[in-house]
Amino acid sequence: MLNPHQVWRRTYACLTASLLAALQPSLMLAQEPALPVPLLAENTAPAPAADASAAGGSPAPIPADPAEAVPVLPDPNTAAPQPILNAPSQNVTLNLINRLVQKGILTHAEASDLIQGAEEDAAFAKFQAQALAETQAAVAAQNVMPPVQPDNEEVRVTYIPESVKAQIRDQLRTEVFAQAREQNWAAPNSAPEWTQRIKMFGDIRTMYQGFNFPNGNANNGEFGNFNAVNTGLPFDEDVVTTGLPQAPYLNVEKHRDTYLMRMRLGFDIDLEDGFTAGIRFATGSTNTPVSTNQALSAAGPGGQGGNFSKYELWLDRAFVKYEASLSSDSHVAFFLGRFDNLFMTSSEIMWDEDVALDGVAFKLDQTWNSDFKTWLSGGVFTVFNTALNFPDNSTTKTASYDKYLFATQFGVEFKPADKIQVKMGFSYFDWKNIEGRLSDPFIPLNNTDAGSTDNSRPLFAQKGNTYRRIRNITPSALNDFGQKFQFQYYGLATPFRQIAWSGRMDLNYWEPVQVSFLGEFVKNLAFNRAAINSVAINNKAGGGSGDFAGGDTAWYMGVNVGKPYSLFNQYGDWNMGFGYRYVESDAVVDGFTDSNFGGGGTNMKGYTLSAAMALSKATAIRLSYMSAAQVAGPTLRSDVVMFDLTAKF
C-alpha cells in the first residue's frame, strides 16, 4: 500500500508533466505566452480549526521549495543579432531568404523581419526545452528528498486535477489487484490458500472371492468359532439341559461365492512448521482390523446390506505427525493417533495390509551415504482398555485388564551392487496381557454374570490360535455340581513375545522389470508347550483328542517379477508373484494376520499365485489363487480364488 508521502510524490510528478505537455502547444504558438498556473497555492496565515477539521485532518506535506525559476522567454530588452543579408551563409534558411530578395519577391525590410522572428522562435524553443529539463530534474530529486514538515500554524492546500485523480485511482487499483492475485484472496475462480494444503486421495475396488473346500476335511465339531462366542454372550457348556452343546462352528465343507467392494477416501493435511495430519475413511462389513471389504448384500450376524440396503463407513485413519531434520542426513518423525503400520514387512504372515496401529510412535532415518541407510522405529500401542463401568451388572467392579503392544524395529537398506537393492528389518514385539487369564472362582447363574477376567478374551479373532477356558466356575448344588450353568468365555492359551526378521532384495538389471526376492521369519519366545498342553482345548493331535500339537514359528519366501503393484502408473504395467508360507498355530496373533489366505488366521501352510496388469494410469486388475492346508490338528484344506478391479484417484 502507498503512504501519503508516496501518493504526494507521484501526484506532483504526474501533475507537472501533464501541465507542461498540455501547455506546450500554446507556448509554441504565442510569441509571449503566459506563465504556467502555479501548482500550489499557499496560505501561510493560520487556518481556522473548523476548516482544518473539514479538510479531514492535516494534508500531506509538499516538497521543498523549488529552485529559482528559469525564464521561459528571452529578455525583450536584449538586442538580437542582425544577420547580414546577401552574404553567403551555411544556413539554408538564410540563403533561401536572400534568393527571395534577389528575385524581388521580398524586400530587405521583410527579409530582416522574417530572420528576426525565426531567431526569436529558436531562442524561445531553446529556453522552453531548458525549463522542461530542469523541471523534470527537480521532480526526480523530490523522490529522494525528505518531505518538508509544515509548521504547526501553517496550512498547505494541494490542488489535484480530476485527470490526475483518475490516474492515481487506476494505479492504486492495479497495485491492489496485483496483491490480491498474489495472496489468492480476491482472484476470481481461485481457491483460498488453506485449500492448497489439503490433498485428497482414495480408491475403489470391486472383487469376486470364491471359497472352495476339497473333500476330506474334518467336520465333527473340531473347528469351533471362538470369535463368535467371545464377541457375544458366553457359551453354555451345559450337558444336562441341552445335551451336546451346540456351539458356533466354522464352515469347512460348503463352497461360497462372495462379492466384495472397498472404498477408501483420505486427506493429507499440511499444518506447516513440520506438522501434518491424516484422515481416512473406509468401508467394511464390520469394524474388524484386518479388512476394509464390504460384502455386497451380506447376510447373517454382523452383515450389512441385502435388499439393496446401504453400507457403513468407518474411521480408518486419524493421526497427527511431526517431522524434523536433525541434520541434512538425519530425520525424525513422531506419530500420534491411528496410523499406518510403520514396521517393515515382506509378507502378511504377521500383519495384514489393512491393520492400523493405535498409539504413539517414532521413526528415525539416517543416511550414511548414497548406498547405505538405516532406520530405527518404535512405539507403544493400545490393544484393549477396560470399560469404565465393567462389569455393568455388579456394584463390585473388577481391576483394569488393559492390553498393550510395545514394539521396536531396526532396519538397514544398502546397495551391494549398482543394480541390487537390499532392505532388512529386525523387530521385537512384546504383547502385554494379550493371553487369557483364569478368573477368580465364582458361580454364574445366567449368561449376564461376569467373571473377573472376562476382559482377557480377545474381542476379535480369526482362527488358528490355541484357546483355553478363562472362567473358573465353582461346582455347587446351584449348578448341579458343574453339569449346568457353565457359561464360558475363551482366551489365548499362550503369551506372545516375538522376534521377527523381514528381508527384500530387488534386482534392477532389466528395468522397468524388477525381480524381487522376499523373506520373513517370526518366532514367539513366550511359547511354552507344556503350559499350553495343560489348558489347550484345540489344536490337538489325533483328530483333536491327543496332546497339543501347535507351534511357535512362522516363515515366508516369495518372488515377484515385474513392476511393483503399488507403483503401477501406465497401461501395460504388470506383475507376477509366487509365495509359500508356513505359519504354526501360536507364532503370531491370528487376529492381525492375513485375512485372505485360507480364510484368515494361523496354523496354515501353502502357496499363493498372483498376476496383475494396469489398464490405465489409475486402474488395474489382479488375479490371485491361494491353496492352504492346516499344519497341526484335524484336517482342513481350502482354496481361495480372487479377482479384483481397482481404480485409484
Image (spheres, helix red, strand yellow):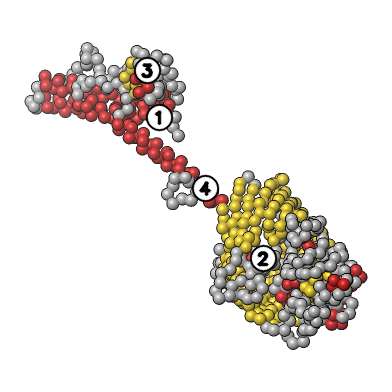
Residue 575 placement: quadrant: bottom right
Cα separation, mark 4 vs mark 2, equals: 36 Å
Local secondary structure at mark 4:
helix
Q: Amino acid at mark 4?
A: Glu
Residue behind mark 1: 7
Name the spot of residue 44 as percent of width and height, x first. 35, 14
Snapshot quadrant of residue 111: top left
- Towards the viewer: 151 or 126: 151
- Nearest to viewer (mark 4 / mark 2): 2
Residue type, mark 3 in image: Ala
Q: Which residue is mark 2?
A: 287
Residue at the far right: name it.
Answer: 530
Q: Which residue is mark 3?
A: 49
Q: Residue at x 15, y 20 (%)?
A: 112
**Which dot, 3 or 4, sits closer to the camera?**
3
Sequence order check, earlier mark of 3 and 2: 3
Secondary structure type for disc 3: helix
Is residue 309 in sight in this rendering?
yes
